[in-house]
Image (spheres, grey):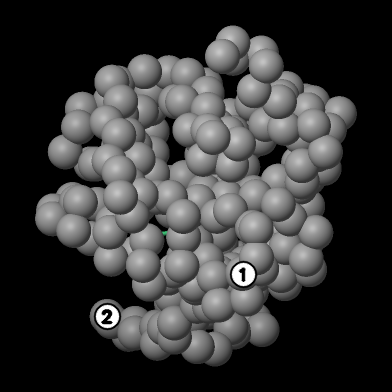
Amino acid sequence: MQVTERSFKGKTVVLTAGPTYEPIDPVRFIGNHSTGKMGYALAACFAARGANVQLISGPVSIKAEHQSINVTSVTTADEMYAAVKQLALEADILVYAAAVADYKPKVVADKKIKKSGNELTIELVKNVDIASALGKEKKEGQFSVGFALETHNESANAREKLQKKNLDMIVLNSLNDPGAGFKHDTNKVTIIEKDATTAFELKQKTAVAEDIVNLIWERING
Ligand code: CTP
């Protein structure tokens, strides 16, 4: 089957990308180094194959170019969850590529926190797990894909996430692989499913996106 024949025409893909920023006060936040490149590459790949893409993006410095990509810009995990929950109703495929902050400050100060003592403690509370919450409401026929970034027990941890979050597929990037992860244009992934494990070479994130999208196509149409 030619790659060009692997069409997603008529399919709606809901995709999260980028980091979330959790405010501490009006000028500070907790965030992470996600650039959104992997998620945006996936969005572009799905759109090029004819899908209607709903991209829910945290703060990033890149742009989606394709006219079939509709971007909803959000800042916090709560905002991302609200947007995804709404859009998931129409989704055929859900891809959770965002690096969602696991915790947020319990209290957001309404004025800038002034410097005082030698120590400052900020109490954090757990954020909603978007993939897990949506996994509980997954509809018949919906296909969902998560990401996992692990430093140890990679496969076992990824398999646990696959099951806990009710995902069909999890894309594992190991921080042990040079050139993979946050700050690179390349990535080396292993795709883990209930009954299959597929390892790929280190390549450009755009090429990784093609591999992921091809495997999704095969699972949906194969
Ligand atoms: N995820 C999410 N909402 C969160 C945390 C994670 O939707 N609050 C999604 C990510 O987008 C990713 C998957 O869940 O697709 C796994 O994310 P990861 O951060 O690796 O897993 P966690 O469940 O946060 O586990 P841990 O950080 O403890 O490894």
Mark drawn on residue 199: none
Given residues 58 and 156, the one toward you in this image is: 156
Residue located 64% across and 23% down the image = 6
Q: Secondary structure at mark 1?
A: loop
Q: Tell us which disc is closer to us: 2 or 1.
A: 1
Residue located 38% across and 44% down the image = 171
Residue 62 visible within the image: no
Q: CA distance from mark 2 to mark 1?
A: 48 Å
Name the outermost residue toward the front. Answer: 222
Position of the C terminus, as image quadrant, is top right
Residue located 18% across and 58% down the image = 156
Image coordinates of residue 83 in percent, x first then y, are 75, 65
Establish if 66 lies above or below 81. Answer: above
- Disc 1 marks which amino acid? Lys
Given residues 23 and 97, the one toward you in this image is: 97
Position of the N terminus, as image quadrant, is top right
Mark drawn on residue 118: 2
Rate crowding at label 2 as few (under 14), some (14 to 19) or many (20 or more) other CA atoms within 10 Å.
few
Name the outermost residue toward the right. Answer: 67
Residue position marked by numbered label 1 in the rendering: 138
